Amino acid sequence: MTRVMKYIKSLTQENLWQQYVTDSVEAFLSNFREDGYAITDITGMCQKYTEDVFDSFNTLYSAEQVKYLAGKFEQYVNDYIEQQGGIENLKLLSEEELGQIWNRECEGLMDVLKRY
């Protein structure tokens, strides 16, 4: 087992979400909805996101590793949805709201870059 996987397996679902996703569940689902995913395709969203996480490590990874982490993300999302009383009770973000968030993040990044 790689050092990364040892670390990942040592974390709870909540810690994994905080470490690798950082967005709210509503923002996560909203972003994927805008990318063309059906709001109910949580498995597909978590699979794609996990592949992106592993790609950011710039190392080889296995399908089993992706399946493990995607499963943790999926369970976290499903637990959250259940706590909210169902997917229909989520406060998903509009395309406009997502754009505003993106613009704020870009402005913050530009402010940081201006310092250097």
Image (cartoon, rainbow, N blue to C red):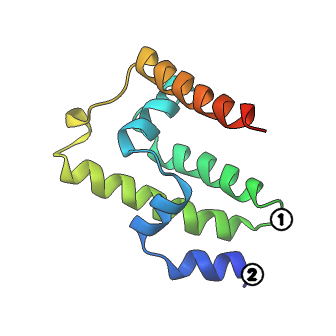
Measured in 3D between alpha carbons, the distance from the residue under mark 1 to the one under mark 2, in whole angstroms, is 10 Å
Q: Is residue 62 above or below residue 45?
A: below
In the image, taking residue 4 as reference, residue 24 lies left or right, namely left
Q: Is residue 25 above or below residue 20?
A: above
Q: Is residue 17 above or below residue 38?
A: below
In the image, taking residue 2 as reference, residue 107 lies left or right, namely left
Give the position of the N terminus as an image quadrant: bottom right
> 116 or 60, which is in the foreground?
116
Give the position of the C terminus as an image quadrant: top right
In the image, taking residue 18 as reference, residue 82 lies left or right, namely left
The residue located at (69%, 75%) in the rendering is 4
Kindly identify the amino acid type of the residue bearing the numbered disc 2. Answer: Thr
Any mark on residue 110, and which?
none
The residue located at (52%, 82%) in the rendering is 10
Q: Quick check: can you spot residue 43?
A: yes
- SS of the residue at dot 2? loop
> Residue 27 location, x and y as percent?
42, 36
Any mark on residue 59, and which?
1
> 5 or 108, which is in the foreground?
108
Which residue is under mark 2?
2
Q: Is residue 14 above or below residue 38?
A: below
Q: How many marks?
A: 2
Label located before the other in sequence (1 or 2): 2
Residue most extreme to the top: 96
Kindly identify the amino acid type of the residue bearing the numbered disc 1. Answer: Thr
- SS of the residue at dot 1? loop
The residue located at (29%, 58%) in the rendering is 79
In the image, taking residue 38 as reference, residue 1 lies left or right, namely right
Q: Are marks 1 and 2 in contact (CB under 8 Å)?
A: yes
> Residue 24 location, x and y as percent?
39, 45
> Residue 76 location, x and y as percent?
38, 59
